[in-house]
Every structure is written in C-alpha cells, then in structure tokens.
Image (cartoon, rainbow, N blue to C red):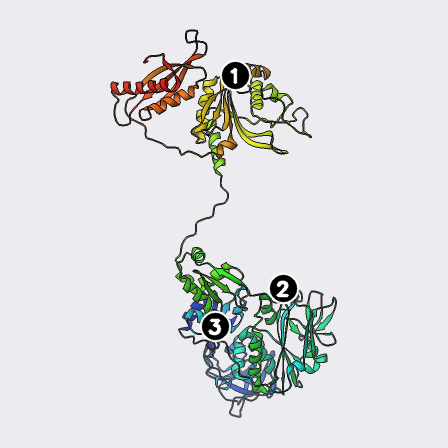
Amino acid sequence: MRVLLSWLREFAPIEGDPVELGEELSSLGLAVEEMAVVGEGLDGVVVARVLETRPHPDADRIHLVDVDAGDGEALQICCGAFNMAAGDLVPLATVGTVMPGGIEIARRKMRGQWSNGMLCSPDEIGLGDDHEGIMILPHDLEPGVPLAEALGIEPDVLYDLEVNPNRPDAQSVAGVARDLAARLGAPFALPVPAVETAGPDATGLIDVDIRDPDLCGRFVARVLHGTIEGASPPWLVNRLRALGQRPINRIVDVSNYVMLELGQPNHTFDLDKVSGGKLIVRRANEGERLLTLDGADRVLLASDGVIADGDDHPVSLAGVMGGASTEISATTSQILLEMAWWDPPSIARTSRRLALRSEASARFERGTDPEIADLAMLRFAELLAPAGAVLNPGQVDERGNTPEPARLRLRTSRTNELLGTEIPADDMGRHLSSIGFEVHPAGGDHDVVVPSFRPDTTAEIDLVEEVARLHGYSNIARTVPSGGRSGGLTGAQRRRRFLRAVLAGSGATEVMPLPFLAPGDLEAAGLGEDGIVVSNPLDAKESVMRSSLRPGLLKALGYNASHRHVGLTLFEIGRVWLPGSTGDLPDEREALGIALGGREAPAAVEAVDLVLDAVSLTGVALQQEPVPGLHPTRSARLVTTDGAVIGAVGEIDPAVLDAFQVPERVGWVELDLTTSFELPQDAHLFTPFSRQPSSDVDLAFVVADDVPAAAVEATLRQAEPDLLVSVELFDVFRSEQLGPESRSLAYALRFQAADRTLTDAEVGQARQRCIDAVVAAHGATLRGADA
C-alpha cells in the first residue's frame, strides 16, 4: 500500500520530519519498505508536441520523432517507444537535464542519427511505474511549459507500506492516517463531501434484489446523470500515478481515487444498458457465461457471485470485475453507481480460480467496512461533479447478512501481564478510542465495541495488540522469554522412579512376571480362590488376572532355585486387579512386591524402612496380625495413623514355599503404591554428621508376643529424640524361662551429641529414660545389661 504524505494530511494535521513519521508508521505495524521524495528532479523536463514520427534508417527498434519544445522548431529525438503519434503531447527531457535517477541528458548520436534530448516514460520521471511507453500528457497543455508547472506537480513524500492481511482498514489512505494521527495525538476526521442533488429520486429509477444474503451483506446504489466532459484534473492524476494506478478516464479515475482514499471499491454501470433498471444479486448458474471488461469470456461456477440485470443475465462478476455489456461509454448519460459488502471467502475463491485479482477483489477478500458506502457515494459524486455529473437524490440500500460488531472485554491486569507493562486503564481506553473503538469503563476494565472497519478484531488478544501498537513497542522493556518446557513427570512418577533406584541400589533385582496367572496360583499363595478370569486368554494356562504380585515373584524364586540360584532379592512394581471394587470393572491398582530369598522377617522389616523412606512416608506402623499366605507369627500389616492398611510384611508361610518349590525361607514386603502415593509426602530433612564420639548400649526387653518390635523401637526413639541417633533390633529370643507367650527383643542403641562428648552420667541418664519409657508403654521388663 502506497500513501502520500500530502494525502494523509487531508485527514489530520500531521507534522514532523518525514523520516521520523516513517519510523512511527513502522512502529505501528505498517512497515515502511521504501520512502521516496516525488515531484523533484523535473527541472529541464518540458511539455513537447509530437510533430512527426518516421523510421530510423539504420535501426528497427528505434524511430525518429520530431517534436516542438515550445519554440516552433522541429527537434529530432531518437526514441525506442512507439506509442505516440503526431499531435500527442509528451514530456521531453532537454539536453543538460539531470534525471531523478542521476543520469544527465546529452546530445548524442544513435546509429548515426542525432538525438537532442529524451522522451520520458512515467517511470523515468517518477510519476508512476509504467515504463512500457512514453507518457502521453493531457491535450490541453502548452508546449514548452515546464512539466511540473503544467501538471501542478509539487514535491511530496511517498511511503510504500507493508500492510498485513489482518489489517484491511490500512488498505486505504484514511486508515493509515487514522493510525498515524492516533500515535501523534492529532485529531482525525473523514471528509464531509458537499454535494447538491437534482433530478428524479434514484429509488424510482433502480431496484435491487439480494437473493443470496450470505454473499452480499449490503448493496447500495445511486444514480448520477449528465454528460461527463474533460480529463481528470492533474492533481488527481498525479496522486493515482504515485500510488501505482494508471489514469484511464474521468469516471474510472474517480472510482479508483475513492477506493484508495476510503477503502471502498465501487463499480459503475450505464443505467440505460441495465435491463429494467434492476440489479439481482445471486450465485451464478453452473456453466453460466459472462464477458468481462477485460474482453475475456468467463465460464462461471455455482460458487461464483454475480450481479444480474432485470432479465437475470449476468452483468458483473461480484466483487471482482464488471461486465462489458453495461460498460460506461462516451454516450452514457445516466450512471448507476454501486458499492457493496461482499463475503470475503466467496470473492477469494472466484478471484483465485479465474486468476483475476484486482485492487477491488484484494480488498473484498480481506474484509471491507460495510458502513462506509454512504460517505464513499457522496465523495464519488463530489469528485465527479466538476466534470458535469449531477447526483440524483435518494439511494437504494438493501441489506443481507453482515458480521455483527464484536463486543469484547479488555482486562487491564491481563493486558499488562501479557505485555509486561504497567499501562493505566485510562491510557488503554484512550488508545482504543483514538482509532475508532467504542470504549466503556467497567470496574477497572473496559467493555469495547469494535468498529465496522476492523473485522480482524474478534478476541481480547486483538485488543491487547492494539494497545501495544499505540503504546509503542519501543516503550515496552525488552525481556528474554523463558523457554517452554514440554512434558514432565508427576509427583507419583518421580517417587516411583526414585523407589526403583533405591531398591536396585540396595542389591534387589527388578523382575517383570506376566500379569496373568494360572488357575490355582492365587490359592497356592494363600490368597484365596481365583479372582477375575479372562474370557479370551492368549493362553488357557494363564487365564486369571492377578490380584497380588506374590505368585509371580514366588514363581521366579522357584525357577531360579531349580537352577541352583538361591538367596536372590527380587522386586516388582506392577498392576494388580481386585475384583468387585467398582461395579462391573475391577479395581486396578499399582503395587510393590519384594521377595527376599534366604532371609527372615527382620530383613523384611528393614526393607520396609527403606521403602517408606524412599517414598517419604512417616507415621506408618506395623500391626502384628496373621496375614494370609504369610507365617502366622512372623507377619504384620502396614497401617497408617488413620488406620488405613497399605501393605504387609513378614515371611512367606512354609506351605506356600513348598507349593512353589522354593527351598529357602523368604522375607516378604508388599505395599499399595496407589494409596501410598496419595498420602502426604514428608520432606527429607538432612542434618550434619556429628564429629563427636558415640556411646553404644544394648538393651533386651521381655515383652508379650503381641507387642510389635517396631512399636518398642518407636518408643525408644521418642524417649530420647536428641541423643539417640540409631536403634537396631539384633536379636529375638524365646525360651521356657521367658514364658509361652513372651519373647525377648534385644536392641543396639547409639547415643551421640552434635556439639560435645557425652559423659558417662549423660549416657546413663539417657539409657534410663529409654528403659522407663518401654516399661511404661509396653509392660516390659529389662533383661539384658550394657554390652
């Protein structure tokens, strides 16, 4: 999109250095790809009249042109363009002229013929992009007059902007001016055309029927009458050329000017050629044909939009190009002016399918303002009035389906959070109001109504972008964004991994038995009858879903024992399925099983301590009671402080070992990990090691058989929390002298202070406190003596 600084200033008092203004445009998201000063460097370029053209005697690609540069004398020019004829007025760069590109024109020979200057194309003198032929000037100019004076050319600044597809409003000079004025704090105003009307009302001359309201959201039509005379004024032609438009005739030039200025494409029909004075907006019939203004016969599809006349014959390809049958000509006396809002996807499909992309279709594809047509109509009439056009009163305005203006909430805190700023809410509202948004304060935030010319704004994040643009990205502190992290482990996953590492580090080997068991395996392990039976097992010998990890681990020990591998410690973390817990579906849980081959119950208790520490659980006690499948007097439940059972510990019952052909004693630990991982996790607290000497004391207590060894250990630790650094059960003894329901538990206690060497008196006092606590809590009697 190209814009002239002088044109921008017609909408707002924009002042400042052109380079700095270009930087402001870029910071607004309208990146300036090129800035050029136009209208300069034309000294020495004059209007010349072509007198005669003739072939070059020694060259086919150039010819000789005699021109009158204002002195009545014929001046010979060698020229490579052939688009002029005798009587045409053309720009002539005289000898000594320095062109805008820096080339100096000199008198020189071309294939033996003198050339006394150069005839110029629009591109060569900075008045357009056309370089295919010599620029043909209006016929009413005087030869010899400086070109800048004859065309009313004044120095101006031309910006070539990169406008992204999400900014349809910036496809017009008014849209660019609105943004720049908002940034500079200058008042912005659209033109107020002064147009007089005369003649019959347009509503009695034309009729519009929208048959596809999704295709056309609004169709506005007016009528102008009168004989259009004369070429477009130089100022209008210069602006069109600067923006890359080739002047054609007065009506087409005004049409293009209004489109560039306000962003509203338009089309003119010769009203006398529109059958019945009626326009029908509809989808094309499959295979329907239309001869467009470029002379091509188009075959249409049912997805294309057309404007048809009263006989239902297509006269225009909606939003893309008009038809030849209703084209304006020199005899046109009534002009039907049409401006509409077309469905962007429909226009895009037709334009791309036919490879027929125009300035109008490019704007319709992005979305035009459905409410600008009234102003654009009056602006068109105002610009065409000097040529003899008179606007009829009244207009036909038919409505289809247009998007409703979005109503959005802009949260101040969220905006500042996204931008990393501290912009006050009032400033946010002021920024949005300055570019036409309707803003209503709402308790520190804003309710915003999006204007019709901003169809790209559909969500709060779009409003945040507008605030950032107008606040200025350069005013936002630069920060390095933190890199995003994908994935990650849950707390349970981390605990599971750590538990595996701890068990492997202790010398245990992880195994993975199949999750299916043979019928009778659960009963052989002392776990009762088979639970869930698979209806379509892969192997009929393994048709039961396991409800415990014990059978699989015992099978592994038995298999290894048959190969003379004994004394193994195996563990598994896997799934078990408990029947009947959740309706028709089994209760699937994650469990831990540890089988300690060749080891007894105390070793299993040590393993429990290791596991509970690994998963950061405290407050779990051993409740001595028979556990199915375990030794009746060497088993216990793992119970939490609120009484929930989360596992078991002990030795495998000898009968179970015989069933699985395991020839050695086996310690056993099982833990419900699903429940354990849901319990609160205690933090690991590390304390520095003491460098002071320690004192070891052995104590043996006679307690009843139903008193767990772990309970006695807990009592010892609670009795002397400061000095007792370790407690270890090293002997369990039974005899007739102790009684049939009693046993002796011997513990090794280590006392140590962090800051001093303990005296004998301090050690003796600590020892006595431990003895008193166990006697009081468990009815024990002291049996042993100091080691």
User: Disc 2 marks which residue?
Assistant: 345
First along the sequence among labels 1 and 2: 2
> Which of the two discs, 1 and 2, sits closer to the camera?
1
Q: Position of residue 70 (x, y in %)?
A: 51, 90
Please tell me whether mark 3 sits on a helix, a strand or a loop.
Answer: helix
Residue 631 in sight here:
yes
Tell me whether circle 1 and circle 2 mark residues in contact (CB < 8 Å).
no
Tell me whether circle 2 and circle 3 mark residues in contact (CB < 8 Å).
no
Q: Quadrant of the C terminus?
A: top left
Q: Position of residue 290 (x, y in %)?
A: 71, 72
- Left or right of 717? Residue 562 is right
> On residue 631, which mark appears?
1
Marks 3 and 1, how far apart in space? 91 Å
Marks 2 and 3, how far apart in space? 28 Å
Q: Nearer the viewer, residue 366 or 312?
A: 312
Q: Amino acid at mark 2?
A: Pro
> Which of the two discs, 3 and 1, sits closer to the camera?
1
First along the sequence among labels 2 and 3: 3
Q: Amino acid at mark 3?
A: Ala
Residue 159 in sight here:
no
- Left or right of 146? Residue 688 is left
- Which residue, as the protein is rendered here, is positioned at the far bottom? 72
User: Disc 3 marks which residue?
Assistant: 177
| Residue 420 found in image quarter | bottom left
Q: Amino acid at mark 1?
A: His
Q: Position of residue 137 (x, y in %)?
A: 56, 84
Q: Nearer the viewer, residue 760 or 644?
A: 644
| Residue 582 against residue 658 in the figure, above or below | below
- Left or right of 335? Residue 694 is left
First along the sequence among labels 3 and 1: 3
